[in-house]
Amino acid sequence: MAGSSLAEKHFRFVVVGGGISGVTCAEQLAFQFPKDEVALLTAAPLVKTVTNLKQVSKTLEEFDVEEQPSSVLEEKYPNLKVIHSAVRVLCAKQHVLQTEDGHNFCYEKLCVCTGARPKLLIENPHVLGIRDTDSAQDFQKKLCKAKRMIVIGNGGIALELVYEVEGCEVIWAIKDKAIGNTFFDAGAAQFLIPSLEVEKPEKTLPCKRARYTIDRAVNPKAGSLDHGSALGPDWHQGISLRGAEEVSHNVHVEYECEIEAVHSQEDFMQSPLYTQDSDLGTWPVYAQLTNGKVYGCDFIVSATGVVPNTEPFLQGNNFELAEDHGLRVDEHMRTSEPDVYAAGDVCSAGWEPSPLWQQMRLWTQARQMGFYAARCIAAHVLEEAIELDFCFELFSHITRFFNYKVVLLGKFNAQGLGLDHELLVRCTKGLEYVKVVLSRGRMVGAVLIGDTDLEETFENLILNQMDLSSYGEELLNPDIDIEDYFD
Ligand code: FAD
């Protein structure tokens, strides 16, 4: 192996990545093989552990995440060794990894859980992505002095940002016809939009999840790497998301457009765009949108999806990559290289999925995949059979957007159904939005916004694929207690 200098260390199992998927996988392996040594190699100074795991229903789960020093894991599992060093290169044929500090690690089975990073639309000091503690702090530093920011993207991070930020005008440029397109249809977007026009309510509930703080005095290396773990739900709770102005929400949405170009102040002042319209004000940076509009702002947040962190593993190896550049894994979380598994944001599910499941790079799936990958590794080592985990039967996600509880089930956006579906919707302004996706009379997906209490009943109806044709719109009749009805 190129540049190898230090002695080799041998571990039966090596997991790379101290995020949710890697930690879950390493813990499960350490638990199942107490006599074998498991190494968790990670670039970040802290590891993420799942606590208070609560099974809300058959497939919906909620949990808290705590960032902890690796000693916590090592105390819990004496056979688990956490090594803080980034992997530089993998030699899959020889079953050897090399870290950036030159150590070589040999493995029998390897699980790659290195997550993903924001897809930055352009490399520019005024354009940032939010991924880890470091980038969240960088964002906060810029925000507290800012009067206007531009947010590009229409997924979960953009949705959270535009709602949470106060005291700063937000220009939100989305390529779709409605906000939150990754999670919602136009109807749900309509339901949510008024939340952007009113004052944000004071938070009454304490946030249960751990704050993402890394004490630089204690850990000077903290955040100095490019490889931090992805933040997750409530990432903004520990930091003030306030700009320099005395306003609550001030969001303007530019629909169906993307960024055409980003200009520095100097370039912009000399460009024909400036001479045409000098009312644009003086700003550190200007974004030219594909709809022809130009906005000056203090900075731009690029929240347009993620790119799997595969780079250190590719050179000299034969990994099959999916269209989204993730390591393609089969139904046993195996990559195309022998004895190399992958889980979480870095991988792409390459198996024929259940008609009611799709991969989305979310916290819950990172945990489920990490856990299942460990079980697959164990089954292969012990030469036992293993079936695809039940959690991949039905997509389910529980979160909060715009201060509403949001539950997504199955093909909640009629993904892949073409015209072969119908929608039933019930909406009470400011209170709840319930959408059901039916295909050939069977429920295949649902969006529940607000405290609807319908998740368990709908999950059952989706899982048992009962023919609901005879119920028609009664299914969402608010005067019928649907829970009793189908019990
Ligand atoms: P990560 O948590 O990214 O962990 C990857 C690990 O690999 C890190 O420890 C990193 O240090 C390590 N690593 C990387 N490269 C190397 C290397 N070369 N060598 C060694 N170690 C390496 N999901 C939700 O479900 N709900 C949400 O509300 C939500 N909000 C989010 C908000 C933000 C701002 C972001 C960025 C993400 C959000 N997500 C959310 C997504 C969620 O955080 C991720 O899907 C999840 O954390 C992925 O876990 P992972 O273990 O696969 O990767």
Image (cartoon, rainbow, N blue to C red):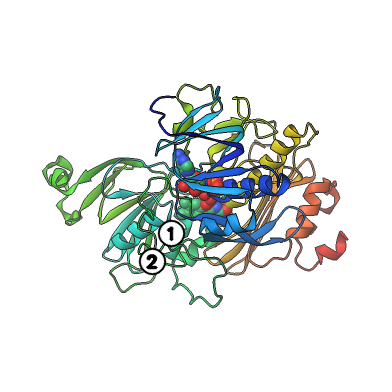
In-front residue for pair 227/264: 227
Q: Is residue 473 visible?
A: no
Residue 310 drawn at (x, y percent): 48, 34
Name the residue: 57% across, 43% down. Answer: 39
Q: Is residue 267 above or below residue 385?
A: below
Q: Residue 449, can we see it?
A: yes
Q: Is residue 451 left or right of residue 17?
A: right
> What residue is rendered at 42% in x and 57% in y?
133
Residue kind at label 1, given as amino acid type: Leu
Provide the residue designation for mark 1.
161
Residues at circles 1 and 2 in contact by the CB criterion of under 8 Å: yes
Give the labeled residue for mark 2: 241
- Give, as a three-letter code, the residue at label 2: Leu
Q: Is residue 265 above or below residue 53?
A: above
Figure quadrant of the C terminus = bottom right
CA neighbours of label 2 inside 10 A, class few (<14), some (14 to 19), many (20+)? some
User: Residue 81, percent across and down?
Assistant: 56, 48
Residue displayed at 67% across by 37% down = 417
Query: How far apart in space, not on screen, are marks 1 and 2 (Cα)?
Result: 9 Å
Tell me if residue 289 comes above or below residue 478 in the rendering: above
Q: Dot 1: within a 10 Å radius of its alpha carbon, few (fewer than 14), some, or many (20 or more) residues?
A: some
Say whether disc 1 or disc 2 marks the residue closer to the N-terminus.
1
Residue at disc 2, CB closer than 8 Å to ligand 1: no
| Picture quadrant of residue 123 | top left
Quadrant where the N terminus sits is top left
Image coordinates for residue 362, horizontal then vertical, percent: 57, 49
Q: Is residue 339 left or right of residue 152?
A: right
Kindly give the residue lying farthest to the front in the view shown: 7
Q: What element carries label 2?
A: loop
